[in-house]
Image (tube, rainbow, N blue to C red):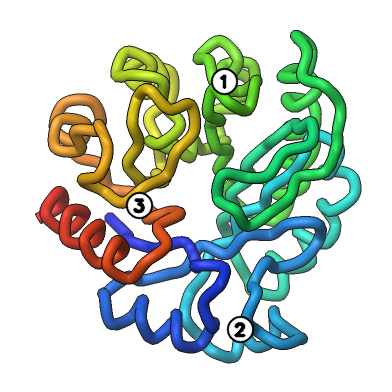
Amino acid sequence: MLQKGMALRFNEEYYAEAEYAKKLNFSFFQIWFFNGCLSINKLDEPKEKKVKENGFPIILHALFDINDFEKYDDKLLELLSFFNHKEVIIHPVCTSEKVSSRTVFVLAISEKVSSRTVFVLAEKINHIHKRLQERQIKLFVENNSVMDGFFNTVDELRVVFDNNPNIGLLLDLAHINDYDHLNEIVKMRYPECIHIADKHFGIPHEHIALGEGDLDFTMIFEKIIPQYSGKIILEAVDTKEDVEKSKIIIDSLFE
């Protein structure tokens, strides 16, 4: 069953944003888990308790640096238990010092990406996947953009997905290089969850309002990902005007 959600906009007041999402008929929020805690700027502690009491459904999106798995996996599992969640997203990164294009996080210095980085990632994904499976929690892993330097090519994605048939692909459409790249990813693993945002193909990493970039969403969902029926999450759109414009396009795609 298709479910439409939106990423919580970091600089918006939480309760007002929840009412806004309801007004637009989104059925859930995506909330980032970063550095061991919920990344909600305008909400006082204890954040997880207030989010749970508010009652608007959420899915956790864990931004894990390659060295974060051991640091924060226990806390992530604790939160999943607290919310009684049966699904979680992991977005793997491996950074030298840079600022996220989403302007929310400054990513700390980690190790340099090398030819073995994706194999290290596969080991860490395998470990946390086993712990999640023990709790009957479905794991979705997100593909990276070419700017991230790893986990972008289909060969790299296969290192994780071919050995883990029960892991779901979260396909970020704004991370594709071109339509051939998208076709290869979908043939490797049909997505069960999608991040939707627009982009220009000449820009390595961009998340903009639908209709503002080069992506032909009608073609994508009619020819490359036909009859898609999982979660679709509007991500990294800043203004209400852009959110509402994007939501109209999403609704038209899935009439």
Residue beneath disc 1: 157
Which of the numbered marks, if any, corresponds to residue 232?
Answer: 3
Residue occupying the point 35% across, 36% down: 199
Does residue 106 show up?
yes
Name the element at disc 2: helix
Name the element at disc 3: strand
- Report the amino acid beneath label 1: Leu
- State the CA–CA distance, disc 3 to disc 1: 20 Å
- State the CA–CA distance, disc 2 to disc 3: 22 Å
Q: Residues within 10 Å of mark 1 (few under 14, many from 20)?
A: many
Whole-percent x, y for residue 102 in the image: 55, 50
Whole-percent x, y for residue 198 in the image: 32, 41
Q: Quadrant of residue 218?
A: top left
Tell which circle, 1 or 2, labels the residue nearer the N-terminal end. Answer: 2
Q: Is residue 141 above or below residue 26?
A: above
Image check: 208 left or right of 108? left
Q: Residues within 10 Å of mark 2 (few under 14, many from 20)?
A: few
Q: Is residue 11 above or below residue 248?
A: below
- Front one among 92 and 80: 92
Q: Quadrant of residue 38?
A: bottom right
Determine contact: label 3, label 1, CB under 8 Å: no
Residue beneath disc 2: 52
Does residue 1 show up?
no
Quadrant where the N terminus is found in the figure: bottom left
Tell which circle, 3 or 1, labels the residue nearer the N-terminal end. Answer: 1
Residue occupying the point 60% across, 65% down: 85
Quadrant where the C terminus is found in the figure: bottom left
- State the CA–CA distance, disc 1 to disc 2: 34 Å
Q: Is residue 139 above or below residue 127?
A: below
Image check: 222 left or right of 43? left
